[in-house]
Image (cartoon, coloured by chain):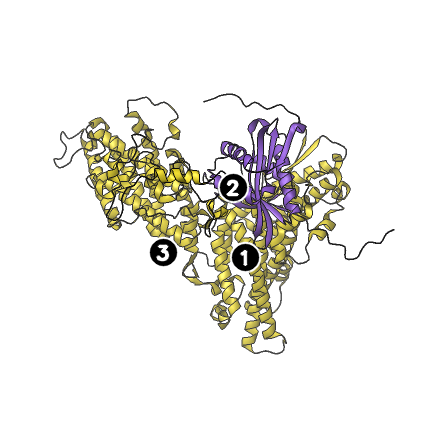
């Protein structure tokens, strides 16, 4: 067992490249990141479901050719609202705290907004202060608390972001001044 | 997997099945698809594929053999020996370990883990019949099984567990045993034997010989007394706990008094169990390393006969996540709390007044009782569609609405809307017994129903009495009933809205940047609630006056009429605090731009809409919207704040109203907290008004340190 103290990577924010999901070659990168950092046992089919159906909503962050973060999402109709859902968000430990996760999520949410989503939702452990702060800054509210949502007995918050209604279309052409 | 592959004999082929090697087929299948390809069919798309398992992945495949393939194999390999040891002293020690671990498992189950991974990880319990030669273990296991069955039954009946559904899933575990109803007599027989043994070894110093028919429990006579005592308190706890459950199950609360006696006995035995730990550890000889407080047994040893993985195939295709069983100490603490909560329930005098009952349930929930206690409360309150199984809900409503006693027999109870109202009240009581998260969601959802009922009743009222002229006596009564009930329904609706809002604080749903709008909305709801409560009390006072047949109003009566009732004053104290907090938050936001969080994707308006959607949809209250919120708070600033101190008002009211609640310790306690909040906030407000705009080093925060939903303003220098 390694007992190294966590080392922070050194980098400039501009060195991080953000890329939209580009195909099968990105899949093992995403899978490795998520398998490493999150405890859910996802089969390859789970990943394929998201990235095949909504490739435009998944993003990867690279630093000097190495994949350091990813976000995986979906969107669809849910009880008469068209809604986006953030399924997985991971940034490896040495790269945390520098806004990479925020940038990944922001890109995905922007894409959802442009695709006509009315709101975005996700669940997060009530103890995950980092995630709650991140999403809070982006405008999510804690809509519900889910008792013992996780199998280890921890509660979850359902976080929701409501987009403002789209601006009304101009009915008559504007006059030239 | 070498050495652990199941012998083919343990999974025999039958008449219609045969073992065949599928490796070539799988090999061919592997080369049949390229990376990125997926078999596609009518019933098999990407979504369905997510349920696929990777066989032999221990995180996903619960069919993987970990230790033993089956319970029988475990037993064949000596995992649960009977007797536990040929050495009687060790046998007794190990039996106590099993009892302790089972208690820890039971507490873990109550706390939300599955029965299969906790209590039924015990191999002895899974094959109870084979323990028959070991009277002590056998009777103990039987009582455990019968107890678990009783608890599952209570929680299922209450269905308070929708969010906590892991609890009642028994997955085909052997919960039903023949003869389990006689488990207590078996336990009593064993208890009697050990009691006699204890008496004998206590008398052994004076008498030379033990009576001939008594066999000692184990071979070390120095330890005999200690072991007898350790066993007796454990057996007696189980016996009394089983009795508690049986008594509380009796209809209409008939068994509550007896239950209290058994609860007291349980507490005594739990104390003895804790005290026995010293003896149990001392007769060991081995020194113990590590933290004994974390262990699931008093002795600190791992118990024999438990394997949580044996049931994994019963649970689900995916293996359950490994869980941590509570420590033995924490398990005892859990049962102490559970028994305390049950005792509170058993002490309740079944008050027919709904208002007192609602206050009792709200107060009870403050100590955060667990599922088992809450289920018992719910079953006591709502049985056979009646309150306490005794009072029809129409009678309860008419009493709460301050209508005369005879009203409860009135035909109006057959009215469809009145029937629905009865159901809503019944649901309200059930909801109040659920966990806070679930409760808030249900309150929000049912607000709409309460509003609809009000509208329906109002419509029915207007249809019947549109033209109010000289009416018959019966019409008069009907009119009175409608009037009172309408008023009462409105008051209840605002009360539910109030609960919905304040539960958000307990559940930590609001960030500080949202406090301003929340307190503003709370202020609006409380204002309406106070208004309706005041009207309701005035109307009930009217009835009382009329009953008293007073010809002339005495000065005392007039004074009483013009005085604001204490219940309303209490609400006014709330109102002042809500208003004060709204204004101070608004001023801080307007003057020094704190507690706002503009995000890139939306504005404060969207957050307002989301937080109050359910209230807005039900028009609770009317004429409240984001623009009116903005209007109320846009001009708040430090100079306007300095002009009026709502917190001082709150302080004054709290002081004034204390004497009216001298018989109500809970409300007195809350008033003290409200006073503290008001005092702190008054001082903080003065400070902020004097220095706020000038001193950038001033840091203001809002902490729920004194009161569960009114924040204390804390001002610090950074």
The circle on residue B254 is 3
Left or right: residue B694 versus residue B511 is right
Q: Residue at x 42, y 36 (%)?
A: B59
Residue B550 lies, in percent from the top left, at: 58, 68
Q: CA distance from mark 3 to mark 2?
A: 60 Å
Q: CA distance from mark 1 to mark 2?
A: 40 Å
Q: Is residue A96 above or below residue B499?
A: above
Residue A3 lies, in percent from the top left, at: 49, 21
Chain of the residue where label 3 is placed in the rendered structure: B
Which shade of the palette goes to chain B? yellow
B255 or B501: nearer the viewer: B501
Residue B117 lies, in percent from the top left, at: 36, 40
The total of numbered circles placed on residues is 3
B95 or A81: nearer the viewer: A81
Residue of label 2:
A48
Q: Say which label, 1 or 3, has the lower sequence index.
A: 3
Q: Is residue A4 above or below residue B703?
A: above
Tell me, yes or no, whether dots 3 and 2 are on the same chain: no
């Amino acid at each position: 067992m390694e007992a190294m103290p966590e080392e922070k990577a050194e980098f400039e924010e501009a060195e991080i490249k953000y890329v939209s999901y580009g195909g099968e070659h990105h899949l093992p990168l995403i899978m490795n990141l998520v398998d490493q950092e999150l405890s859910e046992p996802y089969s390859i089919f789970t990943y394929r479901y998201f990235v095949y159906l909504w490739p435009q909503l998944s993003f990867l962050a690279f630093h000097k050719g190495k994949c350091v973060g990813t976000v995986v999402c979906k969107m669809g109709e849910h009880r008469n609202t068209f809604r986006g859902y953030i399924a997985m968000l991971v940034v490896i430990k040495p790269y945390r705290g520098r806004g990479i996760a925020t940038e990944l999520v922001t890109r995905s949410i922007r894409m959802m907004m442009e695709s006509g989503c009315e709101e975005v939702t996700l669940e997060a452990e009530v103890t995950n202060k980092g995630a709650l702060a991140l999403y809070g800054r982006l405008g999510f509210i804690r809509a519900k608390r889910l008792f013992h949502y996780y199998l280890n007995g921890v509660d979850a918050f359902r976080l929701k972001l409501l987009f403002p209604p789209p601006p009304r279309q101009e009915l008559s052409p504007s006059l030239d001044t | 997997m070498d050495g652990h592959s199941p012998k083919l004999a343990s999974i025999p082929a039958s008449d219609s099945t045969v073992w065949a090697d599928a490796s070539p087929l799988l090999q061919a299948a592997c080369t049949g698809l390229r990376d990125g390809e997926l078999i596609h069919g009518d019933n098999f798309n990407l979504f369905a594929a997510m349920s696929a398992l990777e066989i032999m992945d221990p995180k996903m495949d619960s069919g993987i053999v970990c230790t033993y393939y089956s319970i029988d194999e475990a037993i064949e390999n000596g995992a649960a020996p009977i007797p536990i040891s040929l050495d009687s002293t060790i046998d007794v020690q190990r039996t106590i370990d099993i009892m302790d671990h089972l208690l820890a498992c039971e507490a873990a189950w109550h706390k939300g883990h599955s029965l299969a991974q906790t209590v039924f990880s015990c191999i002895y319990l899974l094959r109870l019949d084979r323990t028959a030669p070991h009277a002590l273990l056998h009777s103990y296991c039987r009582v455990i099984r019968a107890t678990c069955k009783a608890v599952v039954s209570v929680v299922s009946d209450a269905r308070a567990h929708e969010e906590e559904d892991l609890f009642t899933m028994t997955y085909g575990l052997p919960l039903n045993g023949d003869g389990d109803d006689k488990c207590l007599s078996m336990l009593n027989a064993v208890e009697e034997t050990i009691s006699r043994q204890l008496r004998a070894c206590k008398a052994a110093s004076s008498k030379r010989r033990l009576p001939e028919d008594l066999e000692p429990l184990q071979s070390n006579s120095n330890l005999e007394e200690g072991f007898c005592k350790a066993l007796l308190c454990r057996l007696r706890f189980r016996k009394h706990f089983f009795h508690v459950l049986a008594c509380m199950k009796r209809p209409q609360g008939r068994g509550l008094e007896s239950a209290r006696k058994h609860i007291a006995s349980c507490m005594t035995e739990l104390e003895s169990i804790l005290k026995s730990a010293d003896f149990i550890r001392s007769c060991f000889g081995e020194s113990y390393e590590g933290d004994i407080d974390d262990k699931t047994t008093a002795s600190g040893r791992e118990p024999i006969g438990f394997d949580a993985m044996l049931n994994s195939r019963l649970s689900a295709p995916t293996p359950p996540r490994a869980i941590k069983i509570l420590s033995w100490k924490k398990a005892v603490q859990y049962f102490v709390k559970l028994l305390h909560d049950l005792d509170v329930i058993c002490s309740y005098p079944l008050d027919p007044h709904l208002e007192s009952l609602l206050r009792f349930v709200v107060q009870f929930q403050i100590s955060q009782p667990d599922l088992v206690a809450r289920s018992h409360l719910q079953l006591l309150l709502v049985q056979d569609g009646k309150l306490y199984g005794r009072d029809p809900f129409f009678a309860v409503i008419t009493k709460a609405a301050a209508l005369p006693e005879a009203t409860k027999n009135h035909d109006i109870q057959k009215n469809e809307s009145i029937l629905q109202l009865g159901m809503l009240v019944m649901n309200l009581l059930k909801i109040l017994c659920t966990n806070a998260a679930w409760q808030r969601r249900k309150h929000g959802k049912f607000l709409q129903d309460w509003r609809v009922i009000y509208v329906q009743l109002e419509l029915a009222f207007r249809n019947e009495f549109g033209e109010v002229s000289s009416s018959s006596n019966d019409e008069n009564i009907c009119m009175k009933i409608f009037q009172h009930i309408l008023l009462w329904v409105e008051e209840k609706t605002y009360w539910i809205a109030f609960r919905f809002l304040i539960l958000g604080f307990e559940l930590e749903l609001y960030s500080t940047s949202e406090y301003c709008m929340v307190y503003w909305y709370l202020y609006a709801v409380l204002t309406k609630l106070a208004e309706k409560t005041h009207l309701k009390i005035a109307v009930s006072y009217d009835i009382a006056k009329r009953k008293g047949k007073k010809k002339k109003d005495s000065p005392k009566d007039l004074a009483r009429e013009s005085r604001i009732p204490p219940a309303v004053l209490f609400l006014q104290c709330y109102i002042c605090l809500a208003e004060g907090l709204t204004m101070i938050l608004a001023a801080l936001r307007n003057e020094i731009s704190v507690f706002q969080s503009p995000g890139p994707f939306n504005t404060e308006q969207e957050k307002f809409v989301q937080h109050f959607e359910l209230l807005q949809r039900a028009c609770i209250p009317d004429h409240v919207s984001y623009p009116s919120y903005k209007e109320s708070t846009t001009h708040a600033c430090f100079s306007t704040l300095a002009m009026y101190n709502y917190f001082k008002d709150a302080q004054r009211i709290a002081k004034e109203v204390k004497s009216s609640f001298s018989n109500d310790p809970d409300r007195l306690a809350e008033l003290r907290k409200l006073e503290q909040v008001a005092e702190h906030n008054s001082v903080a407000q003065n400070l902020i008004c004097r220095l706020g705009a000038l001193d950038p080093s001033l840091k203001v925060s809002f902490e729920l340190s004194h009161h569960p939903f009114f924040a204390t303003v804390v001002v610090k220098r950074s």
